[in-house]
Image (spheres, rainbow, N blue to C red):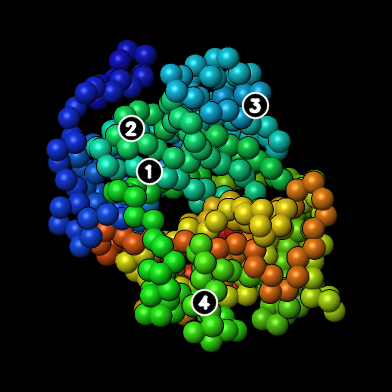
Amino acid sequence: MIKDSEDKYLFDDKNIEDKDFTNSSTFPTGVLPSQTLRELINEKVIFSLDNQIEESQIQPASIDLRLGRYAYRVRASFLPGEGFSVMQKIDALGMHKIDLKNGNVLERGAVYIVPLQESVVLPSRISGIANPKSSIGRVDVFTRLITDKGVEFDRITEGYKGFLYAEISPRTFSVIVSKGTRLLQMRLRKGTPRPNDTATRRLHEKVKLVESKYSDKEFTKRIKNGVPISVDLSGEKTNAIIGYKAKKYTSLIDLDKVNEYNFENFWEKIFVNKDKNLILDPYAFYILVSKESVTVPPDYAAEMEAFNPLHGEFRVHYAGFFDPGFGHHSLGGKGSKAVLEVRSYELPFTLEDGQIVCRIIYERLTENPDKSYGSEKLNSNYQAQNLKLSKHFKNNI
């Protein structure tokens, strides 16, 4: 990799495909843990020529990605498609360029493309997937990763060599971001180790993935295309507050600030009603919580299915990724509730207490990570959580 006079990256044909970065792993396929990600950084498989990649970016099974200096406002979302780079599409659809060096506003309802500081030169058999970080999903900032010649969002194909970009569209609140703001997390996997229901049932029998009203035997039978998660509208454990609904007209949120804003200025409390249901207004944004407590073993990662029309005309959980150790008893979790980021579509839709709203897919790591969610090595904001807004807000339950 070299840097030309216009500060653009050129990717050479460096052959890294013969090196096995998982040759000492317990399993030949799976999500790569923190120590393997660190090795990939050291070998310049994941790299940045702007700034050194920091240890704080390395999570148990993912790496935080940082925004670059410039954002490009575009007329519409897009995928480049085979044969086109992201910058070629920006040339065709771009409206103006925004400098993020000292922070700048991304307006609600607009679409922006931001080149990320990190780039990759992946070996064969290693691919990538991305999600918004939990705090970003909870403020309804729709964020997706795209690549040159990409035909899918949030996917990095095996052997990809090139830039990474974030597509950002604030849906509810206008926000402030800066160069270095971390909105996305990327995880890498070797092979295609998606588990089947039989493996997930065995895992549940071994470690009890969720605490629910059903017996272990009954719940095991309910595992189909992932672990079912339902919504809690009973208020039994949240002092009759069952969720929050975003207000329409608010001030800005600086996404780099923590414990900064009074939640009352941005959110309306939702209280339990006698029917224990909730009618979702079209296009409104809600923060709700699961009935079940979720556990992710230290040698697994988990992903929440973002949307399934079989569950209803709404979307749950933009972020949808749980690190190894989330909610695990050995790391102070004792089971953690899944916070649900919910948006209805064109029609009002009624949610009932206990209704299944999504499913969680568990995926094995190639080996145990050298750091886990909730451990002393990490500042884990949502371990042992119940109903909780993002870390940007103070005084919220």
Q: Earlier in the sequence, mark 1 or mark 4?
A: 1
Q: CA distance from mark 1 to mark 2?
A: 9 Å
Asked if the residue at tag 3 contacts the one at tag 2, i.e. Cβ–Cβ closer than 8 Å, the answer is no
Q: CA distance from mark 3 to mark 4?
A: 44 Å
Which quarter of the picture shows residue 174? top right
Tell me the tag on residue 221.
Answer: 4
The amino acid on which the numbered mark 4 sits, given as a three-letter code, is Lys
Which quarter of the picture shows residue 78? top right
SS category of the residue bearing label 4: helix
Asked if the residue at tag 2 contacts the one at tag 1, i.e. Cβ–Cβ closer than 8 Å, the answer is yes
User: How many neighbours does mark 3 have within 10 angstroms: few (below 14), some (14-19), or many (20 or more)?
Assistant: few
Q: Which residue is mark 2?
A: 160
Q: Earlier in the sequence, mark 2 or mark 3?
A: 3
| Residue 96 located left or right of residue 243 | left
Q: In the image, what residue occupies the spot 19% across and 39% down?
A: 43
Q: Which residue is mark 1?
A: 128
Residue 273 horizontal/vertical position (percent): 83, 75
Q: CA distance from mark 1 to mark 4?
A: 31 Å
Q: Earlier in the sequence, mark 3 or mark 4?
A: 3
SS category of the residue bearing label 2: loop
Q: CA distance from mark 4 to mark 2?
A: 39 Å
Q: Which residue is mark 3?
A: 76
The amino acid on which the numbered mark 2 sits, given as a three-letter code, is Tyr
Mark 3 vs mark 4, foreground winner is 4
The amino acid on which the numbered mark 1 sits, given as a three-letter code, is Gly
